[in-house]
Image: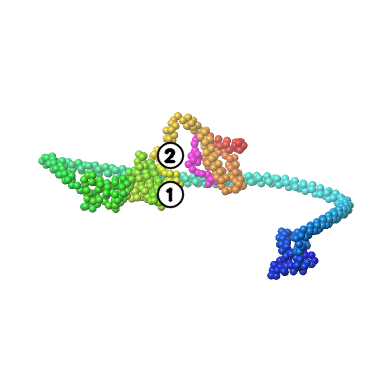
Amino acid sequence: MSITIKLAIDIFNRSKLQTDSDFLISNFAECSDVDKTQINKAALISKLHRYKEKLKGKRGKQKEEFENEVFSIPVATSTSTASKGKLYKDELYSYKETCTSLATEMSEIQKKSVEKLVVIKSEHAVKIKENESKHKQELLSLKKTQSEELQSQTKRLRLETKRVSQKTSKVYNENEKLLEQLKVIKKSKQLICYENILLRRKLERCSIIKETQKQKNLEKTLISEKNKVSNCLREIEVLKQNNSKLLYQLEKEERTVLEQNNKLQLLDQPDPLLNLKVQLQTATEERDYLHSLLLDHEEIILFDPVKKSYTPDTRQCIMNITNFNVSSNNVGPVIKEVLKLANRTPNAVPTRKTVDNIIVEKIAIGQKQLGLTVGAQQDTCLYGDETRNFGKTYQTFLLSDDNKQVYFLGLRDMHDKAASATLDMFANILDDISDICETYRNNDITSHGHSILSNIRNFMSDRAQTNIAFTELLQNYRTEIMPTFLQNWNELTIGEQTSTVKHERIKAFFEIVHGANNKLHKLTLQLVKKQYILACCKVLGLISKLITAPLWRLIESNMHVLDMNTNYLSLLTYLDRMSKDSTDFITGEEFPFPKELVEKDKMLEKLVQANEGIDDKACAFAQLAFSKDCIKSWLKQ
C-alpha cells in the first residue's frame, strides 16, 4: 500500500502527542507493507521534517500536488561495509532506469498532447468557417429587408432635420439677441453699481471733511483759549516779578535808612577807631597765646565729647582714606601711625562699625553730588558693565559728560542677567538719588533722578543680547517719564519747534560737509522750481497713494484670486473715467478701492492740497497717463 505525503505528515503530527516512541513506526508499518524492523527511524524523522518545511513554502495547486505525491519510507539495511559499494551502485542504476522511464513517459505524454491540440485546432477552424458562412447568408437577407425600410426612414429624417434646423436657427438668433441685451444690461448694472459706490464714498468723504473742519475749528478755538490762558499766566508772572522787585527795592531802602542811622550814631560817639585798634591788639594777643597752647598740647581732638560724634574733618579724612582701598578694620591704625609723624595722639580712634557708617554717609553725599551736578548737565553718555566675583554678579553704571568727566552712579548685586532686572536696578539707583536730593528740589516738578535719565543721549555697552534688550526697555521707560518734560510746546515759536526736528540737523550736516558747491543739489533745485516737473511728481505720488499701494494691500490679503476680478473691473472703469476728466483724482475725492485701504497721512494731505499753477498741468498729465494707448504700451514693456 502506498502512502501520500499528506498522510505521512498527519501520522507524524499525531505521533508527537503520544508518549510511546514506537507509535510512529508502528503506524507507518500498518499503512504500508514494510516491517517495523526494516524502517530507519532517524532517517524517517529527518525526511518528515524536510517535507514539512517544503510544504510550508507551497500554496494552492502546488500544495495539493505535493501532498498527493507518494512518500517513500526509508528502510534500514543490514549489509556489511564491503557490500555497501555494490548496493550504492545498484541504487544508482535503479535511479537511472527510473529517470529514463519517466523521461520516455513524459515525451510520450507531450506527443499525445500536441496531437490533441492539432485535432482541436482543425475542428475549431472548420466550425469557424461554417459559422462565417451562416452569418454572411443571414446578413444578406437582413440587408435586403432593411434597405427598403432605411430608405423610407432616411427620407422622413431629412424632412424632419430641415424643419428642426429652421426652428433652431430662429431660436439661436433669438438667443443671440437676448444675450446681447443681457450683456448691455450687465454693463449698465455694473456702471450703476460703481457709480453708487462712488457716490457713497463721496458722501462719506464729505461727512468726514465736515467733521474734520469742525474738529479743526474746535482745535483753533481751544488753541486761542489756551493762548489767552497762557497770556494771563504770563501777565501774572510778570506782575509777581514786578512785585518781588518792588519788595526788594523797599528792603534796600530800609537797609540804607538803617545804615544812615548807624552812621549818625557813630558820629555822635568819641574816637571809634581807637576802640577798634585796642580790640584788635587784645584779639591778636589771645590768638598767639592759644596757638602756643596748641603747640605745647600733643593730643588732637577727633571725637567731640559734647556732641558725642566725630568732627566733620575726621569724617572727611576717613572718607578720603577709604577711597585709597583701605579696609574698615585698618582705618584706625592708619590714623594713629600718621599722627605719630606729627608727634600727636588722637583722643579717640574710629572702630570698624563707625567706619562702615561713615562709608554709608559717603555714598549718600556722593548721590547728593550726582543729583545736584549731573542732573543739570545735558547730552550725557551712560556706561554699563557687569563683573563676577566669588560666584556673584555685580552691575555697575557710569555716566560721562561733554568734558569727558566720568561719574559713578552705583553698583548693585544682581540675581540674574535679564534686561528687566538691570532696568529695575538702574531705576532703584535713580530713585535713591532722587530720595536723597528731595530737600534740594525747590518745588520742581521733576526729580533729580528723572532729570539725569532725561539728559542721557547715548548708552555704551558690549553687544550682548541682554544689553540690546536693555536699550529697548530703557527707551520705553523714558517714554513713560518724558511726557512731564513736554509741556508748553505750543508756547515755542515755529523756529524753535523746527530746530528740534532731526531733519534740520541733517540739513545742517549736509551743508557743512558738501557746502554750496554741490552741482547735483543745484540741478535738482532748478528742476524742482519748474511747474511741469512738480505736476508730474504730484501725479506719481497720487498714483502710489490711491492706486498701487491699495492694490498691493488687496493682493497681499487673504482674498481669493477669482474675487479680485471685481476690484480689477472697478480699477479699469476708474481709469477710463479719469482719462476723460481727472479732477477728482487730483483733488483726492475719488479712488477705485475702498477707503480702508487708503493710508491717510501727511504726505497724502500735502498731495491733495490745491495749487493754482500745478493742478491744471497735473490733470493733463493724469489724463494722458490713464489713456488706453499709454496703458497698453506700459503693459507691453
Q: Is residue 569 left or right of residue 384?
A: right
Q: Is residue 176 in view from this perspective?
A: yes
Q: Label 2 crowding class (10 Å Cα cut-off): few <14, some 14-19, many 20+?
A: few
Number of numbered discs: 2
Q: Quadrant of the C terminus?
A: top right
Q: Amino acid at mark 1?
A: Ala
Q: Are marks 2 and 1 in contact (CB under 8 Å)?
A: no
Q: Quadrant of the N terminus?
A: bottom right
Q: Residue at x 15, y 44 (%)?
A: 289
Camera-nearest residue between 146 and 420: 420
Q: Residue at x 60, y 48 (%)?
A: 560
SS label for mark 2: helix
Across and down, in percent, residue 142 comes to: 87, 52
Q: Which residue is mark 2?
A: 502
Magenta stretch, residue numbers: 591-613
Report the Cα–Cα distance between label 2 and label 1: 29 Å
Q: Is residue 287 left or right of residue 551?
A: left
Camera-nearest residue between 595 and 424: 424
Across and down, in percent, residue 535 comes to: 52, 35
Across and down, in percent, residue 338 comes to: 25, 45
SS label for mark 1: helix
Residue 599 lies in the magenta stretch: yes
Q: Amino acid at mark 2?
A: Lys
Give me the disc on residue 84: none
The answer to whether residue 169 is above or below residue 94 is above
Camera-nearest residue between 11 and 346: 11
Q: Label 1 crowding class (10 Å Cα cut-off): few <14, some 14-19, many 20+?
A: some
Across and down, in percent, residue 596 comes to: 53, 46
Q: Which residue is mark 1?
A: 419
Q: Is residue 141 in view from this perspective?
A: no
Q: Residue at x 54, y 40 (%)?
A: 544
- Kindly give the residue lying farthest to the left in the view shown: 270
